[in-house]
């Protein structure tokens, strides 16, 4: 078993792989606090699963590059979020599969409203709406030096970014890690623990009604 560790700073969303456990970990992922800001200092993480940093569970900044590809319509009392996006670059097919498993066809209810996602992600050879890029070794090593233990698997540079940066080596990042990163590229912030949201670090997580409500609010 491997535990996926997430360490967000104000600009980075970092997924990290920790040590291998002999027994299954209690949680699939753990929330972390801010990274040390300078000098390569290694700080202990300030947050915990009960108090993750940045868990506002909202829409921070819709992706301006995706605005024309995503529509929000009301159909028979259901708010439908519809859009076909593409992804290109290293690992595109695997990433598309992870994103579609979480987001395509997801539905839920929030504050009395019903929501459904018809978002899909298709792998293409080049020119994708979502670009996967390998970090340089220097960039990766610098990020690893800022966070205690493990190795960075992927990061989205900012909310609503059309790029996701991957480790320069192949790292198993776990199920729905890229679906979570996709949420950040849509513009979503983290969700609190025990919410069951795809934007949380819960052991069992999925796209919830509140996640869909947040997306709809940014793309209407």
Image (tube, rainbow, N blue to C red):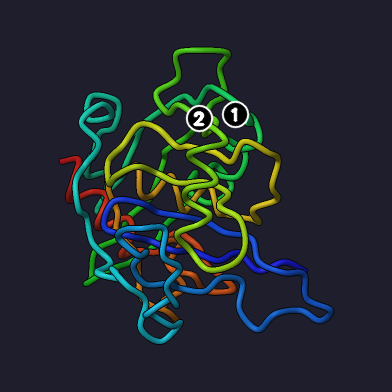
Eyeballing the image, is 206 above or below 50? above
- Contact between marks 2 and 1 (CB within 8 A): the answer is yes
Q: Earlier in the sequence, mark 2 or mark 1?
A: 1
Outermost residue on the right side: it is: 22
In the picture, the disc for residue 92 is 1
Q: Quadrant of the N terminus?
A: bottom right
**Which of pointers 2 and 1 indicates the residue nearer the eye?**
2
Residue 113, located in which quarter of the rendered image? bottom left
Which is nearer the eye, 154 or 119? 154
Q: Quadrant of residue 158?
A: top left
Distance from Cα at disc 2 to Cα at disc 1: 7 Å
Residue 94, percent across and down?
66, 36
How many circles with numbers are drawn on the protein?
2
Write down the residue under mark 2: 132
Left or right placement of residue 114 versus residue 200 in this view: left
Residue 81 lies left or right of residue 120; in this view the side is left
The image shows residue 117, relative to residue 37, as above or below, that is above
Residue positioned 66% across, 69% down in the render = 3
The quarter of the picture where the C terminus appears is top left
Q: Position of residue 196 (x, y in %)?
A: 46, 73
Image: 22 above or below 5: below
Residue found farthest to the front: 39
Q: Position of residue 66 (x, y in %)?
A: 28, 29
Residue depicted at x 29% and y 32%: 70
């Amino acid at each position: 078993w491997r535990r996926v560790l997430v360490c967000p700073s104000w600009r980075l969303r970092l997924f990290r792989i920790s040590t291998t456990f002999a027994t299954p970990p209690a949680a699939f992922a753990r929330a972390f606090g801010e990274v040390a800001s300078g000098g390569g200092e290694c700080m202990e993480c300030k947050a915990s699963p009960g108090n993750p940093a940045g868990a506002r569970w909202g829409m921070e900044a819709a992706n301006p590059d995706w605005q024309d590809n995503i529509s929000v319509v009301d159909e028979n009392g259901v708010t439908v979020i519809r859009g076909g996006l593409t992804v290109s670059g290293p690992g595109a097919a695997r990433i598309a599969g992870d994103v579609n498993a979480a987001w395509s066809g997801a539905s839920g209810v929030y504050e009395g409203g019903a929501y459904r996602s018809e978002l899909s992600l298709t792998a293409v050879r080049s020119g994708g709406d979502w670009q996967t890029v390998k970090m340089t070794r220097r960039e990766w090593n610098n990020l690893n030096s800022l966070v205690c233990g493990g190795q960075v698997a992927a990061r989205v540079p900012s909310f609503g970014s059309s790029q996701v940066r991957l480790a320069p080596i192949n790292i198993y990042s776990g199920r729905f890690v890229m679906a979570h990163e996709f949420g950040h590229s849509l513009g979503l912030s983290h969700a609190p623990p025990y919410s069951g949201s795809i934007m949380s670090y819960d052991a069992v997580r999925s796209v919830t009604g509140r996640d869909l409500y947040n997306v709809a609010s940014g793309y209407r």
